[in-house]
Image: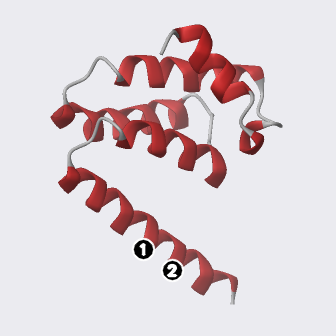
Amino acid sequence: METNNKYEELKDNPALKNISKEKLELLLTYVTQAEKLKQSEVMPYFLSITKKAHEQGISFNDDETEIILNILKKRMSPADIKKIDMIKNLTQVISRSQKK
Protein backbone atom coordinates (compact mmCIF):
# COMPACT_ATOMS: atom_id res chain seq x y z
CA MET A 1 0.00 0.00 0.00
CA GLU A 2 1.36 3.43 -0.91
CA THR A 3 1.81 6.21 1.62
CA ASN A 4 -1.03 8.23 0.03
CA ASN A 5 -3.36 5.25 0.32
CA LYS A 6 -2.40 4.78 3.97
CA TYR A 7 -3.07 8.45 4.61
CA GLU A 8 -6.50 8.19 3.01
CA GLU A 9 -7.25 4.98 4.92
CA LEU A 10 -6.39 6.66 8.22
CA LYS A 11 -8.07 9.94 7.32
CA ASP A 12 -11.27 8.20 6.24
CA ASN A 13 -11.46 5.95 9.30
CA PRO A 14 -14.61 6.95 11.25
CA ALA A 15 -12.81 6.47 14.57
CA LEU A 16 -10.38 9.20 13.55
CA LYS A 17 -12.84 11.74 12.19
CA ASN A 18 -12.02 14.24 14.94
CA ILE A 19 -8.29 13.63 15.08
CA SER A 20 -5.98 16.60 14.64
CA LYS A 21 -3.89 16.82 11.50
CA GLU A 22 -0.75 16.67 13.69
CA LYS A 23 -1.81 13.35 15.24
CA LEU A 24 -2.86 11.96 11.87
CA GLU A 25 0.56 12.79 10.42
CA LEU A 26 2.20 11.16 13.43
CA LEU A 27 0.09 8.03 12.97
CA LEU A 28 1.03 7.88 9.31
CA THR A 29 4.72 8.18 10.20
CA TYR A 30 4.39 5.37 12.75
CA VAL A 31 2.61 3.08 10.32
CA THR A 32 5.07 3.77 7.51
CA GLN A 33 8.06 3.11 9.76
CA ALA A 34 6.52 -0.04 11.24
CA GLU A 35 6.22 -1.62 7.82
CA LYS A 36 10.01 -1.51 7.50
CA LEU A 37 10.58 -3.43 10.73
CA LYS A 38 11.18 -7.09 11.41
CA GLN A 39 8.50 -8.89 13.39
CA SER A 40 10.66 -8.90 16.50
CA GLU A 41 11.07 -5.11 16.32
CA VAL A 42 7.40 -4.11 16.16
CA MET A 43 6.51 -4.47 19.85
CA PRO A 44 9.53 -2.45 21.08
CA TYR A 45 8.77 0.10 18.36
CA PHE A 46 5.19 0.51 19.58
CA LEU A 47 6.40 1.04 23.15
CA SER A 48 8.99 3.58 22.02
CA ILE A 49 6.54 5.60 19.89
CA THR A 50 4.06 5.67 22.73
CA LYS A 51 6.73 7.01 25.07
CA LYS A 52 7.96 9.53 22.48
CA ALA A 53 4.44 10.84 21.85
CA HIS A 54 3.85 11.17 25.59
CA GLU A 55 7.10 13.15 25.95
CA GLN A 56 5.81 15.50 23.22
CA GLY A 57 2.55 15.98 25.11
CA ILE A 58 0.60 13.88 22.61
CA SER A 59 -1.74 11.17 23.77
CA PHE A 60 -3.94 8.83 21.79
CA ASN A 61 -7.45 7.92 22.85
CA ASP A 62 -8.69 4.32 22.89
CA ASP A 63 -9.92 4.40 19.27
CA GLU A 64 -6.65 5.86 18.00
CA THR A 65 -4.61 3.34 19.97
CA GLU A 66 -6.76 0.51 18.66
CA ILE A 67 -6.14 1.61 15.08
CA ILE A 68 -2.39 1.83 15.65
CA LEU A 69 -2.35 -1.62 17.22
CA ASN A 70 -4.45 -3.19 14.48
CA ILE A 71 -2.06 -1.87 11.86
CA LEU A 72 1.03 -2.91 13.80
CA LYS A 73 -0.39 -6.35 14.60
CA LYS A 74 -0.08 -7.20 10.92
CA ARG A 75 3.68 -7.12 11.43
CA MET A 76 3.81 -8.71 14.91
CA SER A 77 4.56 -12.28 15.87
CA PRO A 78 1.67 -14.32 17.28
CA ALA A 79 3.33 -14.20 20.72
CA ASP A 80 3.48 -10.38 20.63
CA ILE A 81 -0.13 -10.16 19.47
CA LYS A 82 -1.13 -12.34 22.42
CA LYS A 83 0.79 -10.03 24.79
CA ILE A 84 -0.88 -6.94 23.33
CA ASP A 85 -4.33 -8.49 23.62
CA MET A 86 -3.66 -9.53 27.21
CA ILE A 87 -2.48 -6.02 28.13
CA LYS A 88 -5.54 -4.48 26.42
CA ASN A 89 -7.89 -6.77 28.33
CA LEU A 90 -6.15 -6.00 31.60
CA THR A 91 -6.33 -2.24 31.05
CA GLN A 92 -10.02 -2.50 30.20
CA VAL A 93 -10.70 -4.39 33.42
CA ILE A 94 -8.74 -1.82 35.44
CA SER A 95 -10.52 1.05 33.69
CA ARG A 96 -13.94 -0.44 34.37
CA SER A 97 -13.14 -1.04 38.02
CA GLN A 98 -11.96 2.57 38.45
CA LYS A 99 -15.23 3.91 37.03
CA LYS A 100 -17.30 2.11 39.67
Residue 90, numbered circle: 1
Three-letter code, disc 2: Val
Find residue 50 and report its horizontal and vertical position in percent: 46, 38
Q: Is disc 2 surrounded by few (<14), some (14 to 19) or many (20+) residues within 10 Å?
A: few
How is the structure coloured here? Answer: secondary structure
- Amino acid at dot 1: Leu
How many tags in the picture?
2
Name the quarter where the C terminus is drawn.
bottom right
The kind of secondary structure element at disc 1 is helix
Check residue 59 in the rendering and tell me which mark sits there, or answer none: none
Q: Is residue 19 left or right of residue 76?
A: right
Q: Residue at x 53, y 10 (%)?
A: 3
**Location of residue 45 (image quadrant):** top left
**Callout 2 touching callout 1 (CB < 8 Å):** yes
Q: Is residue 2 left or right of residue 80?
A: right
Rendered residue at 47%/16% (across/down): 1
* Quarter of the figure with residue 81: bottom left
Q: Nearer the viewer, residue 28 or 3?
A: 3
Residue drawn at (45%, 45%), measured in percent from left and top? 69
Can residue 23 be seen in the rendering of this structure?
no
In 3D space, how far apart are the residues under numbered discs 2 and 1 (Cα atoms)?
5 Å
- Neighbours of disc 1 within 10 Å: few (<14), some (14-19), many (20+): few
Q: Position of residue 43 (x, y in %)?
A: 28, 41
The answer to which of 18 and 22 lies nearer the viewer is: 18
Q: Is residue 44 visible in this depiction of the protein?
A: yes
The dot on residue 93 is 2
Name the residue furthest front: 1
> Foreground residue, 88 or 77?
77
**In the image, is 7 to the left or to the right of 73?**
right
Disc 2 element: helix
